[in-house]
Amino acid sequence: MEIKSKRILFVEDSPTMRRIIANSLQRLGFSDIIEAENGVDALNKLEGQKIDLVITDWNMPEMNGADLVKTLRSMPEYGEIPIVMITTRGMKDDVMTAMKLGVNGYVIKPFTPDVLKSKLELVMK
């Protein structure tokens, strides 16, 4: 299956950042995009959906990205789904923590569409 035909859920609490990510994904050719405001919203929107990739922020209200990743990894239907974390948290310890939680890729804000594209290509092989 071609990468661009994949269904993406992205989770970001900032409306401005959601618009930037949605625009970046659309510029990269993705059209099947579901947006969520936080982890709780994401889990509600995932119910009954076939998702090929999750992109999540780390710092969000109600349920942050780390808790969302832990929850997804504990669910049989999403245990193997590629997850990319996009966050301002760029310290080495943060990256290591995210990887231990089970993310497949890590992008530090601000980012360019090219950085996002290369990360998505890596995790969606």
Image: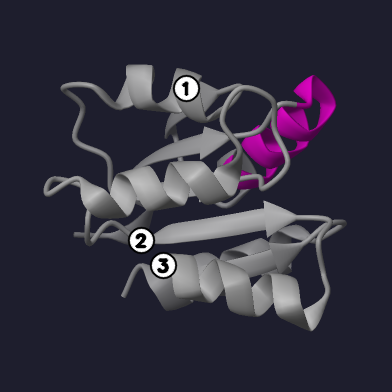
Residue 51 vs residue 24, the one in the foreground: 51
> What residue is disc 1 on?
40
Q: Residues within 10 Å of mark 2 (few under 14, many from 20)?
A: many
What percent of the width, then of the height, locates residue 31? 44, 34
Q: Main secondary structure of the magenta part?
A: helix
Question: Looking at the image, is mark 3 or mark 2 nearer the viewer?
Answer: 3
In the rendered structure, the answer to whether residue 14 lies left or right of residue 106 reads right
Is residue 33 among what the camera can see? yes
Labels 1 and 2 touching (C-beta < 8 A): no
Magenta stretch contains residue 10:
no
Can residue 18 be found in the magenta stretch?
yes
Instruction: Identify residue type, mark 1.
Output: Val
Residue placed under numbered mark 2 in the picture: 82
Write down the region rendered in magenta.
14-25
Count of numbered circles in the view: 3
Residue lying farthest to the left in this orientation: 76
> Which label's residue is closer to the chain start, 3 or 2?
2
SS type, badge 3: loop
Q: Amino acid at mark 2?
A: Pro
Mark 1–mark 3 distance (CA, rounded to whole Å):
18 Å
First in sequence: mark 1 vs mark 3: 1
Residue placed under numbered mark 3 in the picture? 102
How many other residues sit within 10 Å of disc 3, few (<14), some (14-19) or many (≥20)?
Answer: many
Pick the quarter of the image with the N terminus.
bottom left
Helix, strand or loop status at disc 2: loop
In percent of width and height, residue 26 lies at 58, 39
Q: In which quadrant of the rendered image does the C terminus lie?
A: bottom left
Q: Taking 84 as reference, is 81 left or right?
A: left
Under mark 3, the amino acid is Gly
User: Residue 66 vs residue 40: left or right?
Assistant: right
